[in-house]
Amino acid sequence: MTRPPARAVRIVTLYPEVMNVYADRGNLFAVQARCSRLGIGCEVLPIGIGDSLPVEADLVLIGGGQDREQRRIALDLLAKGPVLRDWADADTAMLAVCGGFQLFGDFYRTAQGEELPGVRVFDAITVTPAPGAPRCIGDVLADAAIPEVGELVGFENHGGRTYLGPRGVPLARVRYGYGNNGDDGTEGAVYHEAIGTYLHGSLLPKNPALLDRLSFAALRHRYGADATFESFRDEYAERAHHAAADVARSRGRRNV
Ligand code: GLN
């Protein structure tokens, strides 16, 4: 029998069976691998529709999904909203991708005009143009507003356009791709240690600096603000990052 590491962070994955497109589940594997190199375990709690949230969590992950999946989870997620907002205020690390990101804002309005209320972690709304409008699809290269995160790469595919409100802080500025709405050059959102983004990929395996940022935030939430953790170079992740950046440069939509 292998003994579990004495130290562990608690990771809540929201609706992992429903919200998981373009390998968003890989974000969890990347965090687990990162923590394991530090000798720290991960207690993973998958939370589905109807399940209660635990009393606390260090990291919350939610992936993307199409309108149908978002409809399935929206009301259940809304009921969890007050706890999620409290956690975000108390610096729980969070990563919400695409359809998950949209529902972490104020609301998501579909092309048919149906409005799904969100949990309001981010000051953002998402609206979809009339049916038939082009989707935002392609490879993305963006510069994070968080200095230690630097360049971000990923893949986006969304019909909804997200607009940040006055308290909304973008995660990045898009060099190639559409980002939040294809107009204002913003991509994603940041609130305390919570990150929302349109980038699939999986995102974290090929953005090691963002992986560090999110993992260290989760670890600080568990072990205190003064705790420090070693950063490792990950040659494969860096290579994957550069390959994805080259692809975005060669065939991504140039943002001028
Ligand atoms: N349904 C959303 C949209 O198309 C989200 C898509 C996704 O998560 N990939 O805007």
Image (cartoon, rainbow, N blue to C red):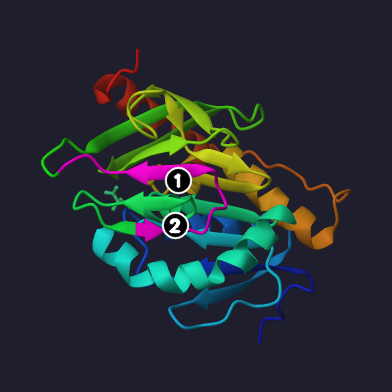
Instruction: Please report whichever mark, 1 or 2, sits nearer to the chain's N-terminal start.
Output: 2
Query: Which amino acid, by three-letter code, is at mark 2?
Result: Gly
Q: Residue at x 24, y 24 (%)?
A: 251
**Residue 64 percent across, percent down from the top left:** 37, 56
Q: Position of residue 218 (x, y in %)?
A: 70, 56
- Residue at left offset 43%, top offset 79%: 49
CB-based contact (under 8 Å), mark 1 and mark 2: yes
250 displayed left or right of 236: left
Magenta segment boundaries in residue numbering: 116-130
Q: Secondary structure at mark 2?
A: helix
SS class, disc 1? loop
Q: Residue furthest bottom?
A: 1
Marks 1/2: CA–CA distance: 8 Å
Task: Tell me if residue 160 can be seen.
Answer: yes
Residue under numbered circle 2? 26
Q: Is residue 60 above or below residue 49?
A: above
Give above or below for 116 relative to 3: above
Whether residue 234 is visible, yes or no, is no
Q: Nearer the viewer, residue 25 or 175?
A: 175
104 or 9: nearer the eye? 104
If the image is split into quadrants, where does the N terminus sit? bottom right
User: Mark 1 belongs to which amino acid?
Assistant: Leu
46 magenta-colored: no
Number of numbered discs visible in the structure rendering: 2
Q: Which mark is residue 203?
A: 1
* Residue 46 location (% of width, % of height): 51, 75
Q: Is mark 2 within 8 Å of ligand 1?
A: no
Label 2 CA crowd tier, 10 Å (few <14, some 14–19, many 20+): some
User: 198 left or right of 28?
Assistant: left
Question: What's the mark number on residue 185?
Answer: none
Residue 145 is drawn in which quadrant?
A: top right
